[in-house]
């Protein structure tokens, strides 16, 4: 079976006839499309004008099919078509087609084929991409991204992805053009199978921190959650290798840490069952998830550990949620009543676990942050959250991780925990479950790691 290009044209065995096409063929097709444009334009201006739109649309679609197939992986034909002016003619015709007040299949087919042609003439051809951008941006993209047809939207995203580069992404920063980025994100949210919209965001938009900031400011809380989920995917899948990629990630981290610090208390709205789906709180939860992933990467952790206020915010938020869970029964109340069969679907499940994880990450081999947690009375707080809690899966494991990072080469933190255990302020069984024990040496209490005995 022959390989197919993204727009459906056959490759391989049909390549030679395509290469042999003469310029006259494309000139004839151009004339037909220009004639069709004139007739459609006249019909739009004068509703009394007798124009056979069905035949016109059918002919237009067939012309674009021919052009679409002729320029697949054929630089010669792409060059000829571009020089003839087929790109500008096509963009003009697409705008006319959009203005026709009908939603019949013939119109949709003509629109789809026209966009497929633009996608194929742009593929691998920078000159064609620049020409399309000059003729089509932003109006054509705004029109097609909001069209009530999934295929037209998908083909539009394909063209946009193909044409974008770092310079063109920066053009999206213009307030009038930012709407294009907004609609791409909306397409991804509403059409999760749209691979092109996903690639536009992850491969282009997220590489411009200024654009991410500008877009984030314009989004609703629900849309911010979608953007943060895409950032999470990007952080998980890509390890930056160039200094530019590292700088981009650091700028994202600075911005998202600032957003978390500003909005962290919104999560307390979730103590009310009526606000279980509060969108501002959901943004806070997703911000924390992204920061946990970012601080788990050894390549960037030192920068993130030095961000002003982030560690203090994490400790303060842990304290607030811990107090809220003790004052009344809510999602932040520690519970161990499940049989193992149930699942809690509340969005704040695991929130305190992730706060402890973030604190542990920020203290990894960092004496300054270890001491800061001591000064903020964060160690007793973490120890008070280390018991099994169905609302916070793996909280014990993250507490182990955090305590070990807090006590590594830090005698003052070790001594504090040892004194707490001696005074009964720390649960010895909890310490044992962490693989830690208190030992007295020369009237000094030492916290040390022990091997667990096999059960």
Image (cartoon, rainbow, N blue to C red):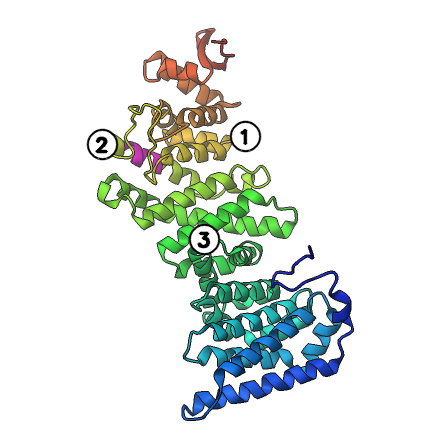
Q: Which residue is mark 2?
A: 329
In the image, taking residue 264 as reference, residue 154 lies left or right, namely right
| The image quarter in which residue 182 lies | bottom left
Image: magenta residue range: 317-323
- Mark 1 surroundings: few (<14), some (14-19) or many (≥20) residues within 10 A: some
Instruction: Report if residue 445 is visible in the image.
Output: no
**Marks 1 and 3, how far apart at CA:** 31 Å
Residue drawn at x 76%, y 70% as measured from the top left:
17
Question: Does 119 appear above or below 293?
Answer: below
Question: Does 183 appear above or below 318?
Answer: below
Proximity of marks 1 and 2: CB atoms separated by less than 8 Å: no
Residue drawn at x 60%, y 71% as measured from the top left:
118
393 or 154: which is nearer to us? 154
Question: Does 412 appear above or below 351?
Answer: above
Q: Which residue is mark 1?
A: 365
Q: Secondary structure at mark 3?
A: helix
Q: Secondary structure at mark 2?
A: loop
Q: Which numbered mark, 1 or 3, is in the foreground of this view?
A: 3
User: Residue 213 at x, y = what percent?
Assistant: 46, 58
| The image quarter in which residue 235 lies | top right
- Mark 2 surroundings: few (<14), some (14-19) or many (≥20) residues within 10 A: few
| The image quarter in which residue 72 lies | bottom right
Residue drawn at x 43%, y 38% as measured from the top left:
311
- Mark 3 surroundings: few (<14), some (14-19) or many (≥20) residues within 10 A: many
Tell me the quarter of the image containing the N terminus: bottom right
């Amino acid at each position: 079976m022959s390989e197919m290009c993204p727009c459906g044209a056959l490759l391989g065995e049909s390549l030679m006839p395509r290469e042999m096409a003469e310029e006259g063929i494309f000139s004839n097709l151009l004339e037909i499309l220009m004639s069709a444009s004139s007739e459609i334009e006249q019909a739009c201006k004068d509703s009394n004008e007798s124009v056979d739109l069905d035949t016109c649309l059918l002919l237009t679609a067939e012309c674009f099919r021919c052009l679409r197939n002729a320029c697949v992986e054929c630089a010669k034909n792409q060059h000829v078509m571009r020089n003839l002016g087929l790109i500008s003619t096509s963009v003009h015709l697409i705008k006319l087609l959009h203005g026709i007040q009908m939603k019949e299949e013939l119109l949709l087919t003509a629109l789809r084929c026209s966009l497929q042609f633009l996608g194929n003439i742009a593929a691998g051809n920078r000159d064609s991409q620049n020409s399309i951008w000059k003729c089509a941006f932003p109006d054509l993209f705004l029109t097609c991204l909001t069209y009530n047809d999934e295929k037209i939207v998908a083909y539009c995203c394909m063209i946009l992805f193909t044409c974008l580069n770092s310079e063109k992404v920066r053009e999206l920063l213009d307030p009038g053009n930012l709407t294009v980025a907004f609609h791409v994100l909306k397409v991804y949210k509403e059409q999760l199978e749209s691979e092109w919209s996903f690639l536009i965001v992850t491969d282009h938009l997220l590489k411009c921190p200024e654009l991410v900031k500008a877009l984030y400011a314009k989004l609703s809380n629900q849309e911010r959650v979608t953007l943060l989920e895409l950032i999470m995917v990007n952080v998980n899948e890509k390890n930056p290798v160039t200094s530019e990629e590292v700088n981009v990630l650091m700028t994202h981290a600075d911005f998202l840490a600032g957003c978390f610090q500003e909005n962290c208390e919104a999560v307390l709205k979730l103590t009310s069952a009526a606000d279980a789906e509060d969108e501002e709180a959901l943004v806070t939860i997703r911000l924390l998830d992204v920061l946990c992933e970012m601080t788990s990467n050894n390549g960037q952790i030192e920068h993130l550990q030095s961000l002003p206020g982030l560690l203090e915010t994490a400790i303060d938020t842990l304290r607030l949620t811990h107090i809220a869970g003790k004052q009344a029964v809510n999602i932040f109340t520690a519970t161990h009543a499940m049989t193992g069969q149930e699942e809690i679907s509340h969005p704040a499940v695991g929130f305190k676990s992730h706060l402890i994880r973030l604190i542990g990450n920020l203290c990894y081999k960092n004496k300054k942050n270890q001491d800061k947690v001591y000064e903020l009375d964060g160690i007793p707080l973490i120890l008070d959250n280390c018991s099994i809690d169905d609302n916070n899966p793996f909280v014990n494991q993250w507490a182990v991780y955090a305590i070990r990072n807090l006590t590594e080469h830090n005698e003052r933190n070790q001594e504090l925990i040892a004194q707490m255990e001696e005074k009964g302020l720390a649960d010895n069984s909890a310490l044992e479950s962490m693989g830690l024990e208190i030992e007295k040496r020369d009237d000094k209490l030492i916290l040390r790691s022990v091997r667990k005995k096999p059960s």
